[in-house]
Image (cartoon, helix red, strand yellow):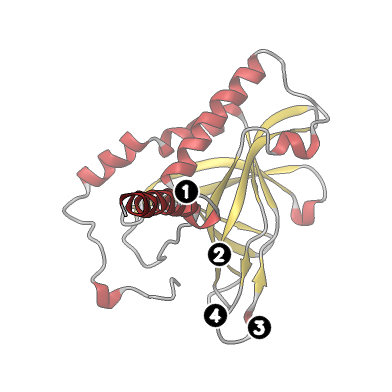
């Protein structure tokens, strides 16, 4: 009887450990979503480069708005590319990964370890994180949203190295009709070291905490009745 009791206890312990490992592994634990109607704090603007329309030609500079969503603890990069409006959201984990990736890139830059023909491997050399994307062509069009991978790396353009964010495809599946299904484009953002440092400063958690403290009287979570449960 005691032997059977010990076997049952051992089995339960193994089951709990296995369940914990299963819960903490896999993509779902890294997913996050953002309600676009949540309270927002504009925290600045940054400059970066995109490829020209449809990827032809060189790079063009664009000013990107940076907004903090304190309820979800997410930072949004708001930009327009190829006639589409994008809200690219970064979780706290993703922001820290960006900061670490930039540090590693700067070290490789200083030691001249960057490879001019690194290709796709270079584009994701410093890691991949999960992001959240909302994209829409115009105000009355379908507002698509989905999680996607964001790769951190570098690339050479016109023989100059750039730190890069590669926004991979996001797939939106409409719950009602397939006619509204959308797939976003692969988009790469190119940063000089100074531009990337400006974004890293806005990503710093202590900076965001100061914003929350400063605006505590004016920023509040939405009431439950006001939250769009479909995350528009």
Marks 3 & 1, CB-CB < 8 Å contact: no
Which badge, 1 or 4, comes first in the chain's sequence?
1
- Image quadrant occupied by the N terminus: bottom left
For the residues carrying marks 3 and 1, which lies nearer the camera in this image?
A: 1
Within-10-Å neighbours for mark 4: few <14, some 14–19, many 20+: few
For the residues carrying marks 2 and 1, which lies nearer the camera in this image?
A: 1
Q: Is residue 36 shown above or below 192?
A: below
In percent of width and height, residue 59 lies at: 73, 42
Which residue is at 22% across, 60% downward?
A: 220
In percent of width and height, residue 88 lies at: 53, 54
How many angstroms separate mark 2 from mark 1 (CA)?
25 Å
Q: Which residue is mark 4?
A: 140
Q: Secondary structure at mark 2?
A: strand
Determine which of the numbered discs, if any, sits on residue 146 in the image. Answer: 2
137 left or right of 43 in image:
right
Which badge, 2 or 1, comes first in the chain's sequence?
1
How many angstroms separate mark 2 from mark 4 (CA)?
19 Å
Marks 2 & 4, CB-CB < 8 Å contact: no
Which badge, 3 or 2, comes first in the chain's sequence?
2
For the residues carrying marks 3 and 4, which lies nearer the camera in this image?
A: 3
How many angstroms separate mark 1 from mark 4 (CA)?
44 Å
- Image quadrant occupied by the C terminus: bottom left
Which residue is at 55% across, 46% downward?
A: 63
Q: Which residue is mark 1?
A: 21
Q: Depth check: give the residue in front, 58 or 152.
A: 152
Q: Which residue is mark 3?
A: 178
Q: Depth check: give the residue in front, 10 or 184.
A: 10
Q: Secondary structure at mark 1?
A: helix
12 left or right of 49 in image:
left
């Amino acid at each position: 009887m005691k032997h059977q009791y010990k076997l049952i206890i051992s089995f339960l312990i193994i089951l709990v450990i296995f369940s914990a490992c299963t819960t903490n592994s896999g993509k779902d634990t890294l997913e996050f979503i953002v309600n676009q109607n949540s309270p927002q704090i504009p925290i600045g603007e940054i400059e970066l480069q995109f490829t020209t329309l449809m990827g032809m030609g060189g790079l063009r500079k664009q000013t990107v708005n940076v907004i903090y969503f304190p309820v979800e603890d997410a930072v949004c990069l708001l930009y327009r590319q190829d006639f589409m409006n994008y809200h690219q959201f970064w979780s706290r984990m993703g922001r820290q990964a960006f900061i670490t990736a930039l540090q590693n890139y700067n070290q490789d830059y200083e030691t001249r370890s960057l490879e001019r023909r690194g290709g796709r491997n270079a584009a994701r050399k410093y890691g991949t994180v999960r992001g959240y994307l909302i994209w829409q062509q115009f105000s009355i069009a379908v507002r698509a949203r989905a999680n996607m991978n964001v790769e951190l790396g570098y690339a050479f353009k016109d023989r100059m190295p750039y730190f890069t964010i590669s926004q991979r495809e996001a797939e939106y599946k409409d719950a009602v009709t397939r006619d509204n299904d959308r797939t976003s484009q692969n988009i790469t953002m190119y940063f000089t070291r100074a531009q990337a440092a400006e974004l890293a400063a806005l990503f710093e958690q202590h900076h965001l905490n100061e914003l929350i403290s400063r605006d505590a009287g004016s920023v509040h979570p939405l009431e439950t009745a006001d939250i769009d449960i479909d995350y528009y």
